[in-house]
Structures are given as C-alpha cells and as structure tokens.
Amino acid sequence: MEGENLTLLMPGITTEDTPQAIERARRQLKWFDLIYNQHLIELPSQLKSFITASQQLPKIGPELFDSIIFDPPSEDHDPEQTSYQNWLRKRRASPSGNATHASLPNSGDNDQAKFILLMPLRLEQLQESMKTIASLIRQSHGKWQLILIADFDAPSAVFTSSESIGWLRIDDANDAKKLTEAYSAILNALPSDWVSIIPPGTELEEYALTTLQNHARRNPEWLAIYSDHDFLDAKGKRCRPAFKPNFNLDYLRCTDYISHAICFKSTALQATEAYSNSPGADNYDAILRINDRFGGAAIGHISEPLVHLPSAKPDIKTSHAARAQALSAHLSRNRIDAEIAQGMQEDTFHIRYPLTEQELVSIIIADDDSLLYLSSCLAALGAATDYSRYEILVVAQDAVELPPGARLIEADAEKSLIQRYQEGARQAQGDYLLFLDSRLEAVQPDWLRRLLSLAARPDTGAVSPRLLTADASRIWRGPYLLGADGCAASLMAGQAIDAAGYLNRQHVEHDVSAVALDCLLIAKSLYQELGGLNAALNTQASAGIDLCLKVRATGKLIAWTPFASLLHHATTAETIDLSDAEQATLRRLWRNALDQDPAYNIQLSLDSSRAFRVEELFTTNWHANLEPLPRVLALENAQDGRDRFLQAMTQMTHQGSCLSAVVRSGKRLPTISEIERLAPDVIIQPLRLDAAFLAWHAQYRQYRSKSRSIFMADARLMSDTLSQYDAKLLQNLAQQADRIIVPTAPLQDWLSRFAADVRVVPDTLDDECWGERIAIRRIGVKMRVGWVADAQDEQDLLLMQNVVAKTIGEIDWIAFGYCPDLMRPYLAEHHPGDIADEAYPDKLANLGLDLAILPKAIHAGNEAASLLRLLEFGALGIPVVCTDILPFQTAPACVARLSNDATEWMQTLQEKLADRNACHRSGEELRNWVKQHHMLSQNLHYWREALAF
C-alpha cells in the first residue's frame, strides 16, 4: 500500500541493523494491541468501501473479463507538486538520509523533553486519529503523550491504560469553550516540557520531536517553536507545502501562517495565561501572548516540514472570528487602538492603525533631469492625496514649473540620484521623509495616510507600498529578496494584482528585509541616526537595500503593504540589476544579512525567476547549526569521476564519519548565498580549467574562507599541449584550493609544480555496485572480446585497428561507449552506453565478454592514469590484455601486459583463443585480487585522511 509502513502493521519490526533501530522496535511492541484495535476500527469502513466499489463493476461474463482494461485515474500534473515531490525524493535519496537526524545528540529517556499533544476528537474523526498515533509510534523521540479530548467513550482499553495515550471525555467536542477548558486543565495537571494542539489526522516526521528538542536545547531562549508543514491528500501523499519565514509579526496579525505546526514551552503558556482565553484560536492566541510578554526572539522557526496536516477544510468562518478576538486582545495588550477589517482574502485581516498626530512629511523627488514624468508625478500628488501635512522637495538640475508649496533644490548635473536624495533629506523640514521616484503616481487618496499610520508605530522603521505597472494590472516591483540572483532581487514583479501569491503574501501586510527606495517612508530622526543614504552606492536598489538593512540592524521592522498602491509609468515589471561593484560593496557591508533573509525560507529558491518555489538543486537535509559531524558538499559538474568520490561520501556518511550532499548542477555554479545556506565544512569538486570557474572560486574563497576547498583531478589534466593560459588558470586554482586529490603518484608529482598539497587516493570500487556481480558467460564459436571507452580514448583504440580488422573471423568484437569511426565496420556489437550511468555495472556484466582489452598509447597522461577500468573488468571476472604501462604494472601476473606491437597482440589473442579455460581462470584470479585489495570499504581510510576528518 502506498505510504504504508511495515512497523504500523507489525510493531516490533525494523529493517535497519543498528542498535538505535532495534531499540525503537523494542519500544514499539507495546503498541500491538493499539494497532490491532486500529484495524478493527477501520474494518467497517473498508468493508463498506469494498462493497460499494465491487458493485460498480460491469455485469459481464468471465469470458469478457480479460478484455477490460482498468486505467488508473489520471493525476493532475501540477508543476509545483512535481517540484515538491522531486525535492522530497532528493532528500530521501541523499547520502545522509536519516543519518542526518541520527547524528543529532539525543539524550536517554531520563533527559528527554516530554511533549504533550492535545487532540480534539469527534466520533467521525476516530479513524483519522489512528494515523496520528501511528506516526507518533514511529518517533525516534520516546517521551511523548497524546491526549485525545472527545465527547464519546474510548473505543478500547488501550486508550485509558497506556502511559503514552490518554483519553479525556467532555460533553461536546464541537464546543470551543469546552475544549479550551480541557486544554487548560491538562496543562496545569500533567507535567510536561512542551505542549501543542493538533487536529486529528496530523502526522509527524519520524524525527520531528528529536529535531524540536535539539533546536530547543540549542536555542534556550525559544519558548515557542514552529516548523514548516504540508498537507496529506486522500491517498496520503504529501502536497501543498507551506515554507514559512522566520517569526513575522505583521504577517501573523494578518493571517495565521503558522497554523498547527507549533509547540509551546509549558511554562511560557502558564506564564502568559494562554490556552485559557481564546476558544477556537488557542494556538494563535498563545503565539501572540508569548510575543507580547517575551518578544519575537522567543519564537523560533525550523525550516523543514516536520508536520503533515490533514487536508480537511476547517470552518473558516468560525476560526476567523475566533482569531479576530485573539487579535483584538493582542492589540489591546499593546495599547494599539486599531480597527480589524476583512482582508483581501477570506481568511485574512486588514488592520487599520490609528494616526493620531498630524506629522509633517517631506516628499523628496529626485529627478534624473529627463523631466519626462515629473509634471504628472507632481500633479498626481496634489490631486490624489488627502493628507495635507506634507511638503514637496524636487531635486533637479533645471528650473521646472512647480505647484504651490513645492520647493526646488537645484542639483549639479554630475550628482547621482542618491546624492540628490541626500541633498533633499538635508533640507527637509518634515518629521518623516518620503523618497519618491518621479516616475511614480499616487492614485489612492489615503495612500500617504496608510503609509504614515504604519511608519508611526514604535516598532517600525520604514514602510513601502505596492508599486504597480501603468495599467494597474500587475506588480511593477515588490519587496527585495536578499541573496537572490547572487545578491538581491525584487519579489512579486510581474504578478497579477488579483493573485494572492504564495501563502497570501501579495495580499497581506508583512515585514520584509528590504524595500525599494523608489517609494520609502522613514522617520527623519531615524534616518539621521543611521547616517542617511550611502553615497558609495549609486543606484536606488543598492542604496535602498543598504538603508533598510541599517534600519533592521536597530531591531525595527520594514513593513510592506498592499493596501497602498502607486502606479509606475513602466508597462511591464522590471528587475533590478546590481553591478559587480555594488554587489561587492553590499557583501562587504552586509555579508550575513544577505545570506539569510528572515522574511523568506531556506528551502525556497534564490533564483528570482523561481521565487517561492522549492529549491530542487542546491539543497541538503542537514541542519547546519546543529550537526556535530563534518558536512561535505560534493559539486558535480559532469559525469566524470562520479564513482571517484560520491560513493566514498555515501559510505563515510553511513558509517557516521560525516554528513554529505551531492549537487549535480551541470555548468550552473551555486551563488555565495546558496553556499552559505548549505554551510558546508568541505566542498569537493572536479577541477575545471575555466576562467569563469576561477572567478567563482575566488569569490567563494573570499566569502566562505572557513570551508575547505578540495579539487579532484585525473590524468586528463596532463597534456603536452597545455597552453600557457591553461597553465596559469591551473596555477591560480591550485593556489586557491586547500588540497587536490589525485588517483596516482605520477599525477601527484606533476601537480606538485602548481599546488602545495596534493594527496593520492587510489581508485577503488564500491562494494555495493561491484562486490557481488560477475560477468555472464555466453557459449559460442567465436570468442567475445571488447573494450569500454569514451571519446578521449580514441587514439588508444586506434592502436588496435589492424588487430581488430584481422581477427573478425575468429573474434566477435564488442564496444561499449565510444568506438572510432574507422573501427565500427569490424564490430559485432556496439553499445553506445553512458559509462557514468548507474546501470553501467549491470550492462558491462551482461555483455558476456570472454576477454577485455586496454590498449594505451605511451605518453605522460596515460602513465599517470588510473587503473579503474582494469578494476571494473576484474571485479566481474573478465580477463584483461593491456599495454605494459605504469598504471597496469601493479596488476597481478594473470593480466597479460604487452607492448603496442600489433604482432604481439595478435599472438596473445591467439593463445587466449586456444585455451579459453585458462583465459577464464585468469579472470577469476584477477577478480580475487580486486576484491582483496581494491574495494572501497578496504580503502576508505585514504578518503578520511584526505578530507581531514
């Protein structure tokens, strides 16, 4: 069954041969009776479904039954869902796998935090509750208790006799007030460390509670912890992920983006009198109360979907009203006399904050001397602004006709827009400064009043409205996403105004990290305290980002609102284009802030064209701030060398030596922000002789110097024709790297001219891929002889052209991979397969080769080459005839080593043909030698030493 877990059918079963897994299985034996009762509860509905379905079958005779084709229902191919499923598969297939969570320190039962989960339950939800229980049984963290609060008696004694499951009977489970009274009573009666309320059918990741506990220990100031979540469809498939920002007060006020994926410190609930005053919105009220008492820093976020919620739709009308009451109480506690109105979406709010004082606003318009849009901008201000306490300062070079009350500040032609804004701010007399691009027009009478009401809040530092295209149909530019596209990018650009956006973000007020300077409102006193705009940044985008980050550094919020809109003269959305110099300046000033945008989520893409879509490429499943093991990131730009280090990473991860992740990105290199998200201790990757790669690596080393950089190199790097340009590239890259790993000593000697630290790690074969396979023997008159090659082996293969041509009457020649055009007419079979394909070992074994050849031209590159291909043939028991060249001289005597003389090759092949049994015996000898000396498990210590852990 899809999604079925063996441990749910038979408690006490485990498929992992580890002490931890066996201990978990032992603890699960106590759930046998509960699982048995679960099946009894589910039996009536399953039987009813079977009867209903079977009655729908066509009434036909048995002779026609075979002609019926039962097509599975077609699924809606939602690209977002496809991306999410790919993301989930990649995380499950990661070399780290569950080792990531297993590596986290988890104390014994006596030192574990106790989690109590409260579940309101109606009779028709009983079957759903069993899914929750099943997921709790799988938890790696053993100290939990589920309390079911129902208006009917427990269906089994297991619910009342278990230490981990409790049953509380109340009069009416539909009565929110009765449920809140029950929550409060349990909170005060039962000892616990953490408490949460979850709906029936909620499932937790196997390591959810372990992860929560470890984050809590790492961050003792956290009194509430929420995670990302997703939903379970009718088939139990995970869908509709909600990847959330870090705690965002304005966002939370407008919509409950946290939902049920939250746990509270029990003492914090008691200290704030939560779970007692807001029936129907208990979790929502508790979050607000903890924020009011302890501040937003007490509310932590784990960027991982640890909670899987049922897809059943809640009663929005009832829950919306309950949250409105909790929100109203929150505003009252903070002495905010605001009006709570309906938001743009059904389940959202629009909070209208009071504006009691009539502050003077200085509207500073810096024109670029085109004067093309200035007149319409000024006209719109006068016609569409109902707030009267403002002054207008126009900073321009030429004299222009201004409306009454506006003031011209003349600027020299060489002054940038930022310098003009600075001059306007120096001469402004207002309490607030509004920086305004001359290409914008106000269209709402209360636009300035709405901005000012937000900016006047004591916790707010700057405010920006929604900027629309000229036809008011789409967003011209939204708030900035830090770290995107290498530095920063505009969110929401080009989105339709009637689209709610990801998690309603386009239709609710929320706090962001930076907004456009094109229309930004800030208190003059704060602006002066921060030192104003940075003249070293010449564009509105970079200067605006810098100013906003200075505001954020004071602890104040940057608010973005869709309830105030201005029109831009552009007819299409525009992206920002930061120069390399601007990016470097911003990174120098705000390195940490650019790498982790708290208003976004590290599981979402930093490619602005894929904003708010899950990151499928540069992703891992480790927790960078928690892991005690070294984190190794393998960047793979091509198929070359995949087995060289990826399988070693996998084995070391499974053995608990490290955590590892593999990114197969082709030519796409991660940005600095993408690397900082992953926070690797070691980056290992193939060495590329490419100027763009050199520039990227230099930047990476500059900003991520604490990560070790290790290159992989093979003999193809060596060339008599290495250009002076490539040699310089190699020298620069080698000097930047901490170490270069090579497979042979001659390559080590050659590279030591360029690099100080070159380490030899000999090629080996992965035990799982090659350990038990053996070549298939085919019975035929002709002997099957072949090779495996790629295009770079062409000159080596051409050494055998005459030999192959003269023996086609006695030998079936088989080529796997590459074959020179001149030799193709002589082949019996050509298999143009991919040597790096995961199925390659099976394909090679199935070729039925009696003998393999490895001709090599004598030159420095081949002298330094690896014997990997010989090992592969040997692991399958295929005998080998090869050139007598350095790499193969370590092979045993059963390998026939020859000069490149065609006559000698012909003679040796005739000897092999004459005694096939002896030939096969030499293959067995070679296989034994490979298995005794050249398997990865026997040589893993070389990798540990080379990676320095």
Image (cartoon, helix red, strand yellow):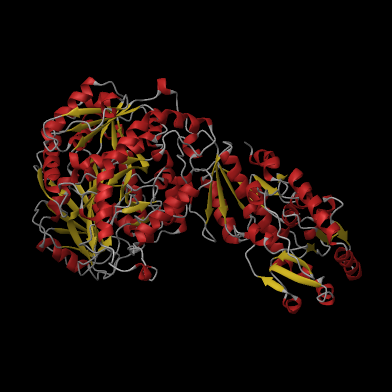
Residue 614 on image: x %, y %: 38, 54
Residue 184 on image: x %, y %: 18, 26
Residue 355 picture quarter: top left
Height in image: 765 above or below 944?
A: below
For this rendering, which residue is in front, 916 or 103? 916
* Residue at point 44%, 45% (across, down): 591
Image side of residue 166 versus residue 607, left or right: left
Residue 175 picture quarter: top left
Total marks shown come to 0
Which of the image's four quarters has the C terminus? top right
Residue 68 on image: x %, y %: 36, 69
For this rendering, which residue is in front, 939 or 37? 37
Height in image: 174 above or below 216?
A: below
* Residue at point 14%, 30% (across, down): 170
Residue 126 on image: x %, y %: 23, 39
Image side of residue 525 versus residue 74, left or right: left
